[in-house]
Amino acid sequence: MIIIKLNKGVLLLSMLAPIISIFLMGYRKINEITHLLGFPISFLYFRGGSLPKHKYQLFTWDNLLQTSYRLDLYIFDVLIMYFIFMGVRKTFKYFADKAKS
């Protein structure tokens, strides 16, 4: 059995980062009716004629049927962010330990 020790704070941050990217990044246009959101990999698809004025409106009942959430891509985004944040954390820890010695 493989036991993986996860840092819960880094995991929570890596789960929030792709969701926050929806509000900070712009739409990426695929064609006339399809737009993508999310970073580093787009996991939210909006298929509709007119874009909502504000991005939080993607989660309202009016736009819910026009919005598609790719959970597999979101999990992949979380994994990417988790490894990036853990790498940055270990790098800072390495240099902090090196400075103490």
Image (spheres, grey):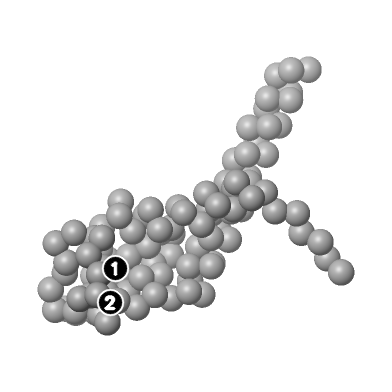
Label 1, on which residue?
59
- Please report the residue visible at 76 percent of the width from the left and 59 percent of the height from the top: 4
The kind of secondary structure element at disc 2 is helix
**Amino acid type, label 2:** Leu
Image coords of residue 15 (percent x, y): 51, 57
Q: Is residue 43 left or right of residue 11?
A: left
Q: How many marks?
A: 2
* Residue 11 percent coordinates (x, y): 59, 53
Q: In the image, what residue type sits under mark 1? A: Phe
List x then y, in percent, for residue 101. Answer: 78, 17
On the rendered structure, is 34 left or right of 96? left
Can you say whether 81 is above or below 48 in the image?
above
Q: Nearer the viewer, residue 51 or 80?
A: 51
Q: Where is residue 10 in the image (x, y as percent from the top left)?
A: 59, 47
> Can the viewer see residue 36 in this picture?
yes
52 in relation to 34, above or below: above
Q: Name the residue under label 2.
A: 64
The vertical placement of 53 against 44, above or below, is above
